[in-house]
Amino acid sequence: MTDATMTLPHRTPPVRQTSTFGFLAALAVFAVTVTVLAEQGAISTSFVKTLGKTLCLCLAAVAMDVVWGYTGILSLGHMAFFGLGGYAIGMWLMYARTEGLVVQSLASQPLPPTPGELRDAIGSQIFGVVGSSDFPLIWMFADSLFLQLMMVVLVPGMLALVFGWLAFRSRVTGVYLSILTQAMTLALALYLFQNDSGLRGNNGLSGLQNIPGFENTSQAALSLGFFWASAVALALGYLLFAWVVSGRMGSVLRAVRDDEARVRFLGYHVESFKLFAFVLTAVVTGIAGALYYPQAGIINPNEIAPIASIYLAVWVAIGGRGRLYGAVIGAAFVSLLSSWFTGGGAPAIALGGYSLQWTDWWLVLLGLSFVAVTLFAPKGIGGLVDLIADRRRPDRQGDYGPDKGAKRAEEGAE
């Protein structure tokens, strides 16, 4: 039987799927609740930013779930795409903000500066920290918001396309592919740490929370704006991926995950499906990063280090891979819990002559949680949702076929 004769299930619109509709409804209620509480002063601006950043991480986790939970590619480099999206928008934010400051400082001069003098002054302000004043080639579009927004999509997408094409055409799979993605991330992070990388080395890009053109807008209003932008991006991303995994495409992706050789034998071009999932999730992850770092205010190469991508995989595993809502639950639960433990919210525990500080032991707790979930609850937190859903289903024991005496007639009469 070839793929031409196989009959796959028709795609079900994701808005008709109970889990998708329920998630979108819950997200809308959550966004409205946070907005009301923020406007009444019940929650702080910093906490609104934390929630907005958490939504961006949830979007990255959903993308990771599609490439790992549905396609079977354990990518340990997806946070590289997240960071590249942040760098792309951060370049424009830093250039536009510095340009405004330089123009304001030179306004008192008797003669207006030439375009060359203005650009040199901006370069000195941005790159003076690494002993330079010249704009690298990668900053050639930094003065254009539209072009930098294009870079948010194109840079992660092109990197994923080139890397994925080389890896998948060579049929690298399993742990070897995971190591390659981690090596790619490490190489990128080490390059960005260099001062001559063009992105200010270890200093990174800072002051990203100051949005050009909104100098008179309070941080409280900006934080709510980015919170809503993050919520909308998560909703659209979730809807997109629900559409991708709900029909023929999703069936093939899951088949590739379960038995790649058999799918190839049936006539499907496995590499194309894997490359599609890898590139699409990389682009969405880059968009999530572009929304995250203006709320964080700073980005540096540490954000792209391999450990960040490992955290992303841990979130998906704890939430329950192979379930889009599980990825959201895992990312939200672990990231918020991390903020509480590492931010000093969790009280220290006195153990005789030793005081247990959660800021020192949080990673140990996270590692133990990952091991426990892997061994005892492979479906993750999302498995609890499945358990509840299974309990609500009617007991359909018996023969429901078309034969005489089947229970179909009995069920219809109830």
Image: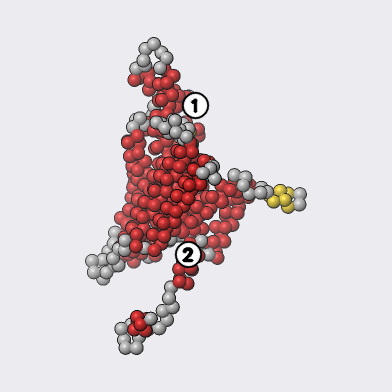
Q: Which of the 4 quarters of the picture holds residue 390?
A: bottom left
**At which x and y percent is residue 350?**
72, 51
Q: Is residue 163 above or below residue 1?
A: above
Toward the viewer: 199 or 351? 351
**In this view, which residue lies farthest toward the front?**
40
Image-quadrant location for residue 367: bottom right
CA–CA distance in space, label 1 to label 2 = 51 Å
Circle 2 Cα neighbour tier, 10 Å, few/some/many (<14 / 14–19 / ≥20): some
Q: Residue at x 33, y 57 (%)?
A: 244
Location of the C terminus (image quadrant): bottom left
Q: Is residue 244 or residue 12 the one in the foreground?
A: 12
Which structural element holds mark 2?
Answer: helix
Residue with the mark numbered 1: 129
Q: Residue at x 33, y 58 (%)?
A: 243
What residue is shown with label 2? 385
- x and y, in percent, of residue 313 in the image: 48, 54
Pick the residue in front: 402 or 182.
Answer: 402
Q: Is residue 201 visible?
A: no
Could you tell whether 6 is left or right of 288 in the image?
left
Q: In the image, which is nearer the foreground, mark 1 or mark 2?
A: 2
Q: What residue sits 41% from the left and 17% below the top?
A: 106
Mark earlier in primary sequence (1, 2): 1
Please, what is the three-letter code of the amino acid marked with disc 1? Val
Residue visible at 32% across and 88% down in the picture = 404
- Secondary structure under tag 1 reads helix
